Every structure is written in structure tokens, then in C-alpha cells.
Image (cartoon, rainbow, N blue to C red):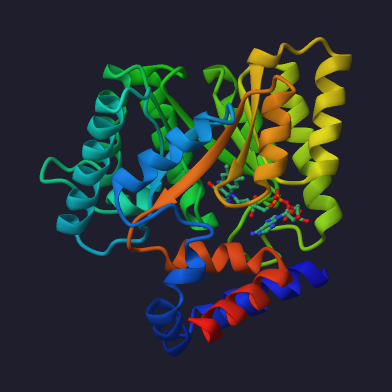
Amino acid sequence: MIDQLYRKAVLTVSGQKPVESLVRSRGWGVAQRFVAGEDATSAIRAVQDLHKDGILGNLDLLGEFVTSPDTANEFAAKVLGLLNDAHAAGLKPYVSVKLSSIGQGMTTPEGEDLGLSNARRIVARAKGYGGFVCLDMEDHPRVDVTLAQFRTLVGEFGHEHVGTVLQSYLYRSEGDWADLQDLKPNLRIVKGAYLEPETVAMPDKADVDAAYRRLVYAQMKAGSYVNVATHDEGIIADVEHFALAHGIAREAFEFQMLYGIRRDLQKDLAARGYRVRAYIPYGRDWYPYFSRRIAERPANVMFVLRGMLRG
Ligand SMILES: Cc1cc2nc3c(=O)[nH]c(=O)nc-3n(C[C@H](O)[C@H](O)[C@H](O)COP(=O)(O)OP(=O)(O)OC[C@H]3O[C@@H](n4cnc5c(N)ncnc54)[C@H](O)[C@@H]3O)c2cc1C
């Protein structure tokens, strides 16, 4: 409950325009702990650097909730460019995309959802390079449409090239998991990072953690690929035990963590033979992502304040 109140306070304050302007103008130095750089070259360099420790990368061009079709199309073009750059650098591109950044909710001249239409181009390009696209999950009003678009894309490209995310804090997620089973979906399981009302999201961390374990275990037992995206050492240890006890092969799942958070744990798991992937955000629109990271941990507020006062 305290975690929830803290998160609510930080996300509410960070949503105020004067706070945003201040942090945007003075916070880039501290944001770089969580953001790999402003351009694709820096992000690709970060992936190559992680490879030295046996860690894989998941590239994310930052941006969300765009308000015009032109901006959405420009954003999609940048993601397509990122796929080209990653391929040219010898990587099998693995990217994450927020459908709100590429036009979800807007309509193409042909009458299709623009987010779906752009996602189709992105997944097709990734598939051509042997790569993968994960559709990030955003705030709860977007869940239905994101899952419906995920279903369409899996039908067109296969679950080897497109996945999505379920958030354990949402009451609905276990039902969504069951509904997706005919797809053998590739799923990333997260706790959830948005400011959500108690009518849709569990306020108590213990419930969120318990639902998290249930979702991961169900996905493992169903024999579908699962991306265990958390820095929670208790959950990670339990997942390791569960996999051992149920004969789940190490190729059937991976651990995912965020760039700049618990690199020690990422290295340790990779050294012990687990597949580990770091989510590497980059780009100029870093503020909303950065705010969510600060909201996850009280110590991060002090880190930001100290960094901004120094800078
Ligand atoms: C790869 C990846 C992809 C994600 N994609 C999505 C998505 O699509 N949609 C979505 O809603 N959420 C997403 N998230 C965020 C997620 O929902 C959580 O907000 C975030 O992972 C923090 O929760 P936790 O599972 O690490 O557990 P927590 O219980 O919050 O944290 C466990 C421990 O991890 C460490 N930790 C956690 N966060 C931080 C931080 N910011 N700074 C420093 N230490 C920290 C602390 O030591 C903490 O005690 C993603 C997370 C990851 C790792």
C-alpha cells in the first residue's frame, strides 16, 4: 500500500508541467543512468557492450501517446530505420514498441487503425531480419485494443516474431492470459508501471507479486515462451526453482531487466547459463519513461535530486 502511495505521489507530481520542464531541462545527466543515449547508434553500442557480459538487448525508441498521424508515421519510420541499423550492425533485431507511439486509435485513409498498420510494417521488417517485436503494454484503456492487435499480428507473422506483455497488477490479466492460449503466445510478464485506479489494478504489492508468479508459472506449464521481466530477486529465485522442479528447459524462458538497473544480477544470471535480455531505451522523449523508473523506488528520487543539484 505504501509502495502504491509513493508511486502515485511521484507520478502525479511528475505529471505537472513545471516539474516536467525543470526535469527535462536539468535532468538529462541523471536520466542517462536509465536511458542509453539520444540516438540509435548509442543504443546499438549499448547492446554490443552488454553482449560482452553475455546479455542480450531489447531496443526501445522512447515515445508514447503521439497526437497526430504525421508524428506517428515519423515515429514508425524511425523504428524501421532502427531495425535496418541493428541488422547492419550484425544484430538480430529485437525491439519493443508502444502502439500509442505509432498511431493506435488513429485511422488510415483505408479505414484501418494506424497503430496496427504501422506495427505490421515494423513486424514484417523485423521478421525479414530474423528479429522480434514486443508490443509493450501501456495504461489500462489500451489493453483490449493492444491484445486484439497482437492477435492479428500473430496470425499474420507467427509467435516467433511478435509478442506482447501482461501486467500482473491488473485484475483482468489472468483472464487475458487464458484467452490468448490458442496463439501459444510469447509473453513478457511485468508487474505494471502506470498509475491505475484501484478498480482495475490491485493496490497491494503482495497480491501483485502473487499474481505475477501465477502468470509466469501458467505460461511455463503451458509450454509457451515467457519473458520474466522483473528485478525482484525473490521472484527470480522462485522461477528458477519452479523451472527446475517442472523440467522447464532454459530455452523456454528468459529473464529481462531494464537498462541501468541491477546489472550485477543480469551478469550473474547470464554467467549461470540463463538467457538474459536488457531493455534498452533511447531517444529524446525520455521524460515519461524516466518518471516511471523514479516512481518505482524511493531511493531514486534522492538520486535525481542530488544529480540535478550537482548538474
Ligand atoms: C524488461 C522490462 C519490460 C517492461 N515492460 C513493461 C511494459 O510493457 N508495461 C509496463 O506497465 N511495465 C513494464 N515494465 C515495468 C514493470 O511493470 C515494473 O514497473 C518494473 O519492472 C519494476 O518492478 P519489478 O518487477 O522490478 O519489482 P519491484 O517489486 O518493483 O522491485 C523489485 C526490486 O527491483 C529493484 N528495482 C525495481 N525498479 C527499480 C528502479 N526503477 N530503480 C532501481 N531499482 C529498481 C529494487 O531493488 C526493488 O526492490 C517492464 C519491466 C521490465 C524489466
Q: Which residue is drawn at 47% across and 45% down?
A: 280
The picture quadrant where one finds residue 306 is bottom right
Q: Where is residue 197 in the image (x, y as percent from the top left)?
A: 65, 67
Q: Which residue is drawn at 85% across and 42% down?
A: 234
Q: Which residue is drawn at 63% across and 24% down?
A: 275
Foreground of the two, 297 or 214: 297
Question: Can you say whether 88 is above or below 77 in the image?
Answer: above
Q: Which residue is drawn at 35% across and 17% down?
A: 130
Q: Where is residue 16 in the image (x, y as percent from the top left)?
A: 48, 85
Q: Where is residue 271 in the image (x, y as percent from the top left)?
A: 70, 25
Q: In this view, does 191 lie to the left or right of 127?
A: right
For residue 223, say whether it is visible.
no
The picture quadrant where one finds residue 120 is top left
Q: Is residue 103 left or right of residue 173?
A: left
Q: Quadrant of the N terminus?
A: bottom right
Residue farthest to the left? 109
Question: Can you say whether 10 is above or below 246 in the image?
Answer: below
Question: Can you say whether 260 is above or below 299 in the image?
Answer: above
Total numbered badges shown on the rendered structure: 0
Q: Where is residue 47 in the image (x, y as percent from the top left)?
A: 44, 36
Foreground of the two, 283 or 208: 283
For residue 91, say whether it is visible.
yes
Question: Can you say whether 24 is above or below 51 in the image?
Answer: below
Residue farthest to the bottom? 18
Q: Is residue 89 left or right of residue 303?
A: left
The picture quadrant where one finds residue 89 is top left
Q: In this view, does 83 lie to the left or right of 235?
A: left
